[in-house]
Amino acid sequence: MDTQTLVVIGVVALVVVVLLLLVRAARSGRRTPRLRPLTGDARERYISDWDDIEAKFVDSPEQSVREAEALVTAVLRDRGHPLTERELPREMQRARRLSYTSRNKTEAMRQAMLHYRSVMERMMGSIDDGGRGTVRREVAS
């Protein structure tokens, strides 16, 4: 082999190594954080607070969405989630975008609540009854 062929092989190998390192870095950057479990009392309190927020949604959707964001943030904080924008759950990022930038406010608020509810369910398990035998309230479709 001549030196030109060796240089080309070396450059190709270097590009492959760099690409593999970039893929590895991207994967490690989106790791799911290791979360602490909530105490039973905290879980019950959060579920009760969520029920109150959902009950107010029809009369005050914007306030309910703001309270939902604050509650979800508190749950994430209590579970030890790193609250950097990049590491927030995708549903929470979508809910924030919807609630701050959408033109159709009513539909955006409804969609944001659904996204926040999804995060709450994932953080606590199902919040349908919270172990209390209550019936789940739906956010109007």
Image (tube, helix red, strand yellow):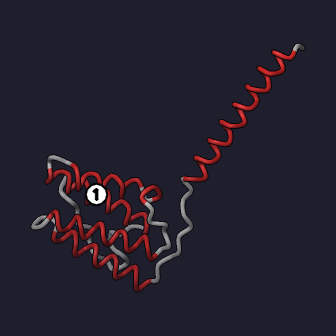
Question: Residue visible at 44% across and 83% down?
Answer: 40
Q: Relative to residue 38, is residue 107 drawn left or right?
A: left
In the shown orientation, is residue 10 left or right of residue 114?
Answer: right
Q: Residue 113's spot in the image, x, y percent?
A: 26, 60
Q: How far from the left and from the top, in percent, is residue 111?
A: 24, 53
Q: Count the marks: how many?
A: 1
Q: Quadrant of residue 41?
A: bottom left
Q: Residue drawn at (86%, 17%), measured in percent from left and top?
A: 3
Residue closer to the observer: 114 or 10: 10
- Looking at the rendered structure, the kind of residue marked 1 is Leu
Which quarter of the rendered picture does the N terminus lie within? Answer: top right
The picture places residue 103, in percent across and down from the top left corner, at 15, 46
Q: Residue at x 74, y 32 (%)?
A: 14
Does dot 1 land on a helix, a strand or a loop? helix
Q: Is residue 81 left or right of residue 55?
A: right
Point 48% across, 68% down: residue:
81
Front residue of 137 and 133: 137
Work out which residue is located at the far top of the displayed protein and give it. Answer: 2
Q: Residue 20, how many percent across, how many down?
A: 68, 39
Q: Can you say whether 90 is above or below 43 in the image?
A: above
> In the image as oriented, which residue stretches furthest toward the right?
1
Seen from this angle, which residue lies furthest left? 59
10 Å neighbourhood of mark 1: few (<14), some, or many (≥20)?
many
Q: Which residue is mark 1?
A: 114
Most distant residue in the bottom direction: 41
